[in-house]
Amino acid sequence: MEELKENDIGKLLIPGGYETAVIGVDETNNRLVISKDLCVEIYLNENKSDIEEAIEFLEFNLFNSYLGEHTPIFIWEQKFHEISWRS
């Protein structure tokens, strides 16, 4: 796999305050992969909120935001055995 070129790194979009939620990079499209689980944890640590309010806020203001072709990919982390497969 190719490493990201230095000029590509500048294109990666990292939401302020959520740097520690980055769990990977889509090297093909130069997009960060960010854990929704960790974003919720960060939000809860910084705000007086319950989990439902935190998820609602983050879904509206962060997870579903489009910032162009380098918009981060936000995922809920699941272990392979936790994925339910459709037949």
Image (cartoon, rainbow, N blue to C red):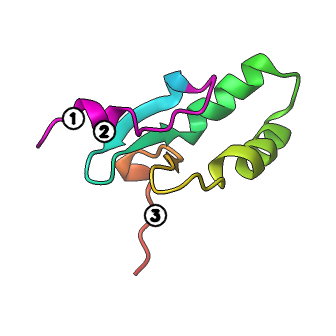
Looking at the rendering, the stretch of residues picked out in magenta corresponds to 1-18
Query: Horizontally, is 4 left or right of 14 in the view?
Result: left
How many residues crowd mark 3 within 10 Å: few (<14), some (14–19), many (20+)? few
Give the mark nearest the N terminus, 3 or 1: 1
Residue 26 in the image: above or below residue 42: below
- Helix, strand, or loop for circle 2? helix
Query: Horizontally, is 61 left or right of 68 in the view?
Result: right
**Residue 42: quadrant of the picture:** top right
Q: Position of residue 64 (x, y in %)?
A: 66, 55
Q: Nearer the viewer, residue 28 or 22?
A: 28
Distance from Cα at disc 3 to Cα at disc 1: 37 Å
Q: Position of residue 76 (x, y in %)?
A: 53, 47
Residue most extreme to the front: 7
Distance from Cα at disc 2 to Cα at disc 3: 35 Å
Q: Position of residue 38 (x, y in %)?
A: 57, 30
Residue at 11% over, 43% down: 1
Query: Horizontally, is 4 left or right of 51 in the view?
Result: left
Residue most extreme to the bottom: 87
Q: Nearer the viewer, residue 33 or 54?
A: 33
Which amino acid type is shown beneath numbered disc 2? Asp
Badge number at residue 5: 1
Count the labels in the image: 3
Q: Nearer the viewer, residue 76 or 57?
A: 57
Q: Quadrant of the C terminus?
A: bottom left
CB atoms of marks 2 and 3 within 8 Å: no
Residue at 76% over, 51% down: 60
Which amino acid type is shown beneath numbered disc 3? Ser
Residue tagged 2: 8
Residue 60 in the image: above or below residue 40: below
Residue tagged 3: 84
Q: Position of residue 8 (x, y in %)?
A: 30, 38
